[in-house]
Image (spheres, rainbow, N blue to C red):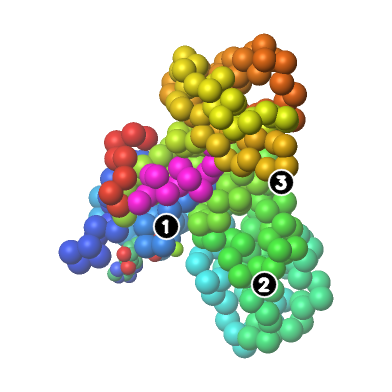
Amino acid sequence: MIEAQHISKWFGPILAVDDVSFTVERGDVLGFLGPNGAGKSTSMRMITGFLPLSGGKVTIGGHDIETQPIAAKSLVGYLPENAPGYPEMTVDSFLHFAAEIRGLRGRAATEAVTRAIRTCFLERVRYQTIETLSKGYKHRTCFAQAILHDPPVLVLDEPTDGLDPNQKYEVRQLIKEMGKTKAIIVSTHILEEVDAICSRLIIIDRGKLVFNGSPAELRARGSSSGTVVCRVLAVSAAELVQALSGLAGAGRPEVVRDQAGAVTVRVAATGRDASLAGRVRKVLAGKGWEIDELHTDEGRLDEVFRELTIPDTVQEGQS
Ligand SMILES: Nc1ncnc2c1ncn2[C@@H]1O[C@H](COP(=O)(O)OP(=O)(O)O)[C@@H](O)[C@H]1O
Ligand SMILES: [Mg+2]
């Protein structure tokens, strides 16, 4: 449904988006991650036809955003950054206005507005002017505008920004639900969001694509991924380290905690061998020690995110 091919954007001498390509199908929620200033909003503006491309091509449902803008844009709902709206309009009149722009008239318009108001939990503020709304309600009013015409493609720029935890949860549920049938791109810098709603992820850093894959694949990239952590009772730290030293495919055991008769040790995996936990268990069982806990670290998203986007550790060309 969304196809971005080698898109680039120059702002004068600044290359804000540098040769980024990806596709999004129906049923996909694509997380668009990157530090501030990475080029997420700029990419979204190009995809939705708000900014001309400096290079590359975008098609929405097969329609070129630059040569067939009306056909392409009619398939897209867009929630821009900072949720703009008309401050002096009421929620209801703003949404009717947006419905009219989308070509909806009469009963169809009223039904669309009512449905969007219900979906975005706006009943309570329907006849209030937008300038009097809290940030969360303003945001949801703009969200309602984006889904009015029930588009198959949604482009959402930081959709949970400024919401309280309950509203964040509601919006994430909403995106997840809509993601079953639509093609959705969601930008965020909140990593927990990625796990909650995204089936796929791309990360951009200083305009360049540095990762394209699933959340699990991203996690597996982390340097702590595959590390085995175990807590053993009634043993000394020295004995435990000694016993777990020299295991094949493992680094030197590192004592994390030594407290109240329990020692916690981390053993880093040096290869991609999934059986390290089993071998650690075997050693411990062979000694007859009591295992209080033993698990394999899945890797942390924040860790990989930093590894991929910190300037001197940027691993370009690994996507
Ligand atoms: N209209 C503009 N004119 C000049 N530079 C811009 C403009 N919009 C964005 N930029 C620059 O492009 C880069 C990417 O910005 P942006 O896409 O907003 O990043 P993100 O959304 O990932 O935080 C930044 O360096 C920003 O300063
Ligand atoms: Mg942005």
Query: Which quarter of the figure has residue 125?
Result: bottom right
Query: Which quarter of the figure has residue 105?
Result: bottom right
- Judging by the rendered image, the residue that carries numbered circle 1 is 35
Q: Is residue 178 left or right of residue 244?
A: right
Q: Residue at x 25, y 65 (%)?
A: 11
Q: Regarding mark 3 in the picture, which secondary structure is present there?
A: helix
Viewer-nearest of labels 2 and 3?
2
- Judging by the rendered image, the residue that carries numbered circle 3 is 177
- Establish if 19 lies above or below 319: below
Work out whether mark 1 precedes mark 2 in sequence or the reverse, and give the earlier one: 1
- Establish if 311 lies above or below 132: above
Q: Is residue 300 left or right of residue 312?
A: right
- Judging by the rendered image, the residue that carries numbered circle 2 is 136
Q: Is residue 35 magenta?
A: no
Q: Is residue 307 magenta?
A: yes
- Establish if 313 lies above or below 70: above
Magenta stretch, main secondary structure class: helix
How many numbered discs? 3
The foreground one among 218 and 67 is 218
Q: Residue at x 72, y 76 (%)?
A: 92
| C-alpha distance separating marks 2 and 3 | 20 Å
Q: Label 1 neighbourhood size at 10 Å, few (<14), some (14-19), many (20+)?
A: some
The foreground one among 41 and 239 is 239
- Establish if 262 lies above or below 272: below
| C-alpha distance separating marks 1 and 2 | 23 Å
Amino acid type at circle 1 is Pro
Q: Label 3 neighbourhood size at 10 Å, few (<14), some (14-19), many (20+)?
A: few
